[in-house]
Image (spheres, rainbow, N blue to C red):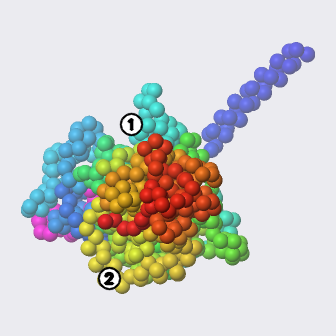
């Protein structure tokens, strides 16, 4: 009996090995077609097609083009494809103008040459240096040729693929390194995932059966990045190429905003359809996107962040809306990719973008009536007052007509506000398309630094948007964020001229027709509370739960700036003067405004500031010991007499 059991166990083990071998040998390898390397012939054909497209116009110091005879020529005008280049110069090759090769390097080429020495090889690249006489051969090797990697196909018919593992390994974490330190998300979790991992299809079932028109335009996908993790950047590119109809992706234009390691982007130029632009200094999101848009050759632009994953059939519904009306600017529903474990989580399709008077973007639910209408057809587009800004599709001619971006905005922040106001007020529309889904890694902190500090940069950019587009309603922003008034915002004459040229509507129209749910706050006066003409009510630098005092008036706002609202609130920023107890002699402190009774005050004749509910008034008699307090009202006391008004 024991021998029979051993025999059965032995046969079972053998059978398991046989089955494993059978399934392994019979399972076909799934092609990750996104990682196919660029063929020399294919590249040449692409550049020949590109040569008939319009080029953009900012200065470029160096271009890189595929090697080989008969490649379209690269005169100085070729630099325009990268958002740069001038006129003149002798032709190379066929003599035709071309918007750019596989790699476009803006500025110095020392980094590129250093990487070539260290073994970075691009697929059939010739270095061309721009001089006053045009573009000439670089110094990468004989005849200006850099070391050349194998072509996109081997000697047989089998495709050659990008070395994903080697690329990720070169940017991997060091032993013991905090996986969150570089990117403020878990890079270790990201690096462990394949570039073509499966993600859940988060679309509504009705989207999966929806048919789209056949004559959709192709698009140029523009992705800007700065020190992005290699695994997330590669997965972004792969998701675009693998989950889009091949004929609809003309190119992916990567704009490297002066990352510490140029090879992060240069290596990716080996991949079919990928082009790279590298800035020679940090430019920020806005200027980098404009450079990418100027280099793009398609009539439709698709802007994406560098840490996203496109879902199934994400592109067609966006292109269809723009094809039907070029003045539409359309966005996908933005799903969530966990910053900790990179789990892909579907987001609600019943959201739109909005903001408060502090001009910070927020997601808000559609009204019950709007949700009821969408219940019958959840595939219909959603009008949105504002877009998040990272992911959208726009007609290139319309993008140019609208003035692209405000090029004087720095690094990041506020650009979504500005383009949202501009699109709506100047005749376009913003939509969220529920059948398009793209996942995005949301982080709690920025992984990179802001020159001058993130708060100052954001306030400067936001002020530029408010000053140009909000008319007198900008005062509500300054009431909500008083410190913003201290941040210089630069010259805006060119943007005001654009607004006039496009005959854009006033902000009042925007509030009434696009965002009626944003109610103007109660009217309030802004000024200072003076006592004896020389002393002013002052926060003394205190914040929540801090007392207030009096200090010699300096007439510059700051700690002495107060807003007196229609409800009777005495506000400094988002803090209100608050009676601690409804009793004589109670302290008065700063607390977050909450519309409670102990935050309401009334200005009486004779200068008394009386509490709304009981007969106590603001009194400065003991300000040096306990701050301003609330004492029994007495108009004969000079310590209770205040005047409120503008600065002297």
Judge by depth and name the residue closer to the eye, 479 or 509: 479
When asked about the image quadrant of residue 559, the answer is bottom left
Frontmost of labels 1 and 2 is 2
Q: Which residue is mark 1?
A: 170
**Mark linked to residue 355:** none
Q: Which residue is mark 2?
A: 500
Dot 1 falls on a residue whose secondary structure is helix
In percent of width and height, residue 111 lies at 23, 44
Who's the residue at 34% across and 49% down the image?
Answer: 453
Q: Is residue 95 magenta?
A: yes
Residue at the farthest right position: 1
When asked about the image quadrant of residue 371, the answer is bottom right
- Whether 541 is drawn above or below 188: the answer is below
Who's the residue at 35% across and 73% down the image?
Answer: 468
The stretch in magenta equals 87-104
In percent of width and height, residue 392 lies at 46, 66
Judge by depth and name the residue closer to the eye, 153 or 282: 282
Q: Is residue 497 visible?
A: yes
Mark 1 Cα shell of 10 Å, populated few (<14), some (14-19), many (≥20): few
Mark 2 Cα shell of 10 Å, populated few (<14), some (14-19), many (≥20): few
Q: Quadrant of the N terminus?
A: top right
In percent of width and height, residue 137 lies at 14, 53
**Total numbered circles:** 2
Q: CA distance from mark 1 to mark 2?
A: 51 Å
* Circle nearer the N terminus (1, 2): 1
Who's the residue at 26% across and 41% down the image?
Answer: 115
- Whether 79 is drawn above or below 340: the answer is below
- Whether 99 is drawn above or below 534: the answer is below
Q: Is residue 501 magenta?
A: no
Q: Is residue 440 visible?
A: no
> Left or right: where does residue 94 sit relative to residue 255?
left
- Whether 564 is drawn above or below 344: the answer is below
């Amino acid at each position: 009996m024991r021998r029979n059991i051993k025999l059965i166990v032995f046969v079972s083990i053998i059978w398991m090995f046989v089955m494993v071998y059978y399934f392994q040998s019979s399972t076909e390898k799934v092609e990750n077609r996104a990682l196919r390397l660029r063929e020399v012939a294919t590249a040449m054909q692409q550049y020949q097609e590109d040569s008939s497209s319009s080029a953009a116009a900012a200065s470029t110091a160096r271009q890189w083009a595929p090697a080989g005879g008969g490649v379209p020529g690269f005169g100085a005008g070729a630099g325009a494809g990268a958002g740069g280049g001038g006129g003149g110069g002798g032709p190379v090759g066929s003599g035709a103008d071309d918007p750019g090769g596989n790699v476009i390097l803006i500025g110095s080429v020392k980094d590129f040459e250093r990487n070539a020495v260290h073994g970075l090889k691009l697929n059939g690249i010739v270095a061309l240096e721009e001089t006053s006489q045009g573009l000439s051969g670089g110094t990468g090797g004989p005849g200006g040729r850099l070391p050349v990697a194998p072509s996109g196909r081997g000697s047989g018919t089998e495709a050659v693929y990008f070395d994903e593992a080697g690329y990720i390994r070169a940017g991997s974490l060091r032993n013991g390194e905090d996986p969150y330190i570089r990117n403020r998300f878990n890079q270790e979790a990201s690096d462990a995932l394949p570039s073509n991992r499966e993600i859940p299809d988060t679309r509504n079932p009705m989207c999966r059966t929806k048919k789209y028109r056949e004559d959709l335009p192709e698009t140029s996908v523009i992705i800007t990045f700065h020190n992005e993790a290699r695994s997330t950047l590669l997965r972004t590119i792969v998701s675009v190429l693998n989950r889009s109809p091949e004929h609809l992706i003309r190119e992916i234009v990567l704009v490297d905003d002066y990352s510490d390691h140029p090879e992060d982007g240069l290596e990716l130029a080996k991949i079919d359809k990928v082009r790279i632009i590298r800035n020679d200094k940090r430019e920020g999101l806005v200027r980098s996107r404009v450079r990418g848009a100027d280099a793009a050759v398609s009539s439709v632009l698709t802007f994406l962040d560098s840490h996203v994953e496109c879902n199934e059939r994400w592109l067609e519904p966006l292109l269809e809306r723009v094809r039907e009306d070029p003045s539409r600017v359309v966005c996908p529903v933005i799903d969530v990719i966990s910053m900790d474990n990179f789990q892909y989580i579907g987001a609600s399709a019943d959201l739109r973008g909005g903001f408060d008077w502090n001009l910070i973007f927020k997601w808000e639910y559609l009204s019950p009536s709007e949700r009821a209408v969408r219940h019958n057809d959840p595939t219909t587009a959603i009008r949105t007052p504002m877009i998040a800004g990272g992911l959208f599709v726009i007609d290139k001619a319309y993008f140019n007509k609208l003035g692209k971006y405000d090029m004087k905005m720095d690094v990041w922040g506020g650009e979504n506000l500005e383009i949202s106001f501009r699109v709506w007020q100047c005749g376009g529309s913003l939509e969220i398309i529920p059948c398009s889904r793209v996942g995005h890694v949301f982080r709690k902190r920025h992984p990179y630094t802001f020159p001058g500090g993130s708060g100052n940069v954001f306030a400067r950019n936001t002020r530029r948007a408010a000053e140009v587009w909000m008319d007198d309603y900008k005062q509500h922003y300054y009431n909500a964020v008083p410190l913003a008034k201290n941040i210089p915002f630069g010259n805006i004459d060119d943007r005001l001229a654009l607004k006039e040229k496009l005959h854009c509507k006033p902000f009042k129209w925007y509030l009434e027709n696009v965002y009626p749910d944003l109610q103007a706050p109660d009217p309030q006066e802004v000024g200072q509370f003076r006592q004896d003409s020389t002393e002013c009510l002052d926060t003394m630098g205190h914040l929540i739960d801090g007392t207030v005092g009096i200090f010699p008036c300096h007439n510059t706002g700051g700690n002495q700036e107060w807003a007196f609202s229609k409800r009777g609130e005495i506000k400094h920023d988002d803090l209100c003067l608050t009676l601690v107890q409804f009793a004589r002699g109670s302290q008065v402190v700063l607390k977050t405004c909450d519309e409670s009774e102990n935050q309401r005050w009334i200005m009486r004749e004779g200068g008394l500031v009386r509490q709304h509910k009981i007969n106590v008034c603001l009194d400065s008699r003991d300000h040096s010991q306990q701050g301003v307090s609330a004492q029994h009202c007495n108009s004969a006391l000079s310590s209770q007499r205040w005047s409120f008004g503008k600065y002297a």
